[in-house]
Amino acid sequence: MAELAFVKLGGSLITDKNQEATARTDVIVRLAEEIQRALQARSDLSLVLGHGSGSFGHITAERYHVQNGCNDWRGYAYTGAAANRLNRIVTDALLTAGVAAVSLQASASARCRSGKLMLLAMHPVKELLRRGLVPLVYGDVALDDEWGSTIISTEATFGYLARALRPQRIVLVGEVEGVFSSDPFKDQGARLIPVIEAHQLEQLEWVLGGSHAVDVTGGMRSKVQMMAQLVREMPGLRVSLVSGLRPGLLEHVLLNPDWNPGTVIMP
């Protein structure tokens, strides 16, 4: 049976989030090659790809408060351009690896209200998938009816697309193996949580902290909450959070839908 999966390459994975506009090119190239191998091995697999903006978009957005209305509207332009520069690096790596990725700029059609994505053009995504291509979205700036400007996270875009396209899986690929009992960068005793039941998410609020670097879209808490809401709405959906630093892991995850090497969010 054909499968549609959404895959996000996290900003903290593909950039050094503590060094402005610093891509981890070796990681990006390796992940692109893993994606291509998975697509070659599974002719029944269709993908929508996405990536975060990491140290390209987040640091610039924080500087100008773009996420909730700009303190200087030039910052909107600078942040969009920064996100686009990283997207060009990712797109080129995918194309070089043989993945027929087509970049879609969310800000060109997005409409937001109070930080929530209300409208996004769907036809390009559907048509690209129908043609056997791979839509590639990314964290981007957006105009906001209430705030003036905001940031659309890749998870927010995935959420909007998922409600229309009904993927079987969403895979969030980050630096760490999944969701932990505390910040694994600060606590050596942090434990991996292998399963999160979406209807019991409130019981885990105490472990869902923010990102360990600048993240204007809310860090781990926001990501897990957004994905849990999707799972509650779409009971057949499976959301996995895995590490992209283990060579070959993403490829194996795409080839084996039931394998869970990290954290899975279930109904």
Image (cartoon, helix red, strand yellow):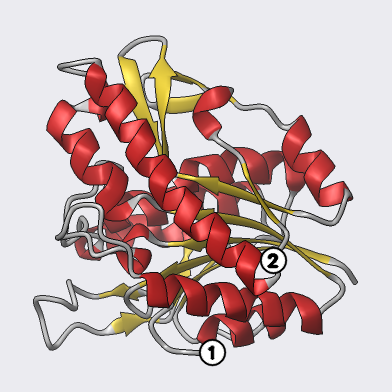
User: Is 122 left or right of 22, judged from the image as shown?
Assistant: right
The CA distance from mark 2 to mark 1 is: 17 Å
The quadrant holding residue 65 is top left
The x, y position of residue 27, in whole percent, is 41, 76
Task: Please state the total of marks drawn on the protein image.
Answer: 2
User: Is 18 left or right of 83, judged from the image as shown?
Assistant: left
The x, y position of residue 188, in whole percent, is 12, 87
Write the residue at 73% across / 41% down: 125
Label 2 residue SS: loop
Residue type pointed to by label 1: Gly
Residue 99's tag is 2
Residue type pointed to by label 2: Val
**Residue 226 drawn above or below residue 265:** above
User: Which residue is the site of mark 1?
Assistant: 248
Q: Quadrant where the N terminus lies?
A: bottom right
The x, y position of residue 20, in whole percent, is 18, 53
**Residue 160 drawn above or below residue 147:** below
Q: Please tell me how crowded label 2 is: few (under 14), some (14-19), or many (20+) other residues with Cα within 10 Å.
A: many
The x, y position of residue 60, in whole percent, is 21, 38
* Residue 142 in sight here: yes
Out of 218 and 131, give the one closest to the viewer: 131
Label 1 residue SS: loop
